[in-house]
Image (cartoon, helix red, strand yellow):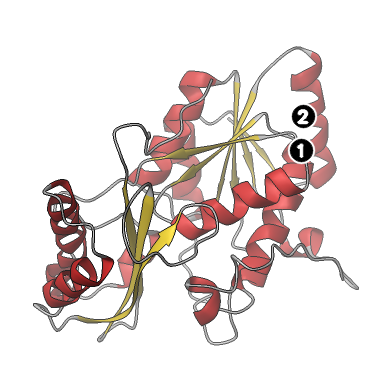
Amino acid sequence: MKIVTDIIEMQNESIDKKRSGKIIGFVPTMGALHEGHFSLIEYARKNCDCVVVSIYVNPTQFGPFEDYSKYPRPFNDDCKKAEKYGCDILFNPSSDSMYPKNYMTYVNTENITTKLEGAIRPDHFKGVTTIVTKLFNIVTPDFAIFGQKDAQQTVVIKRMVEDLNMNVSIIIRPTVREKNGLALSSRNVYLTDSEKTGAPNIYSCLHNVEEKYKNGEKSVAILKKNMLAELKKTDAFSTEYIEFVDMISLTPVQQIIDKTLIVLACRTKESNTRLLDNTILHTAAHITNEEMH
């Protein structure tokens, strides 16, 4: 595995690979790699000739009171893991190179970024779309692979790619979970022991609503009420929002009649960690996860 820190060098690496007919698969990350990331890298390894993984903790997607300074950065360990799971090139740029002095250009996807996470973290998605655009321009991948856990992020990135005619296919892979159902996240390291005990209740309530939907319940009001009751069974965290939304516009729905995304966010009470999770209710005619063609 080759470690690249220079932007021009990374661009030249991609040019060389494409000139030789190689298909580039790209997994953008902020490091602190876990099994969720590994599943994305392995998928890229199986389907692409060259696998590029970026590790960059992007400052522009953190709010002024968020955890940018303490975000875990086990770089050496991440390098070993990325190589183990099939990474060919690890791109690790500096903030000085990604946002040099007098930097003033940002990418903004409107409407869908002001809801859900965007309502709580107003500038978050502007930072996400800007850094992803920059990484796409540098790596020029054929495929970029993301996890379903950050559901709104995947909707925003797909919208951006389509609207800006970017020449990259976006692949969304299933959420990877711990044995108790908790969605894997680099921020899980912040959880206290009692929070780790209560956090699986989030997945439990999602699983229960899936079962109720399969048994014929389509009223969002009833399903949401059941979810809130389930989440109140633990006092380890408080619920920030539960929303049933359309998969494209993220507009709230009142009745589930087609493919519907359920997103929720909770905040733990001891470590003040935000936990995100989601599920998709869909008819048999729909496929939850996208596959590479």
Residue 134, image x and y in percent?
Answer: 76, 51
In this rendered view, identify the residue nearer to me: 93 or 265.
Answer: 265
Please tell me in which quadrant of the rendered image residue 208 appears.
bottom left
Name the residue rendered at 55%, 58% in the picture: 249
**126, above or below 209, in the image:** below
Indicate whether 55 appears above or below 204: above
Q: Nearer the viewer, residue 137 or 38?
A: 137
Task: Name the foreground residue: 7 vs 117.
Answer: 117
Residue at the disc numbered 1: 10
Q: Is residue 22 visible?
A: yes
Left or right of 41: which side holds 234?
left
- Spot occupied by residue 284 in the image (x, y as percentages of width and height): 29, 33
Rendered residue at 74%/12% (across/down): 21
Where on the picture, by quarter, is residue 199?
bottom left
Q: Quadrant of residue 106?
A: bottom right
How far separated are the C-alphas under marks 2 and 1? 5 Å
Provide residue 241's location: percent of width, then percent of height: 35, 77
Q: Which residue is identified by label 2?
A: 13
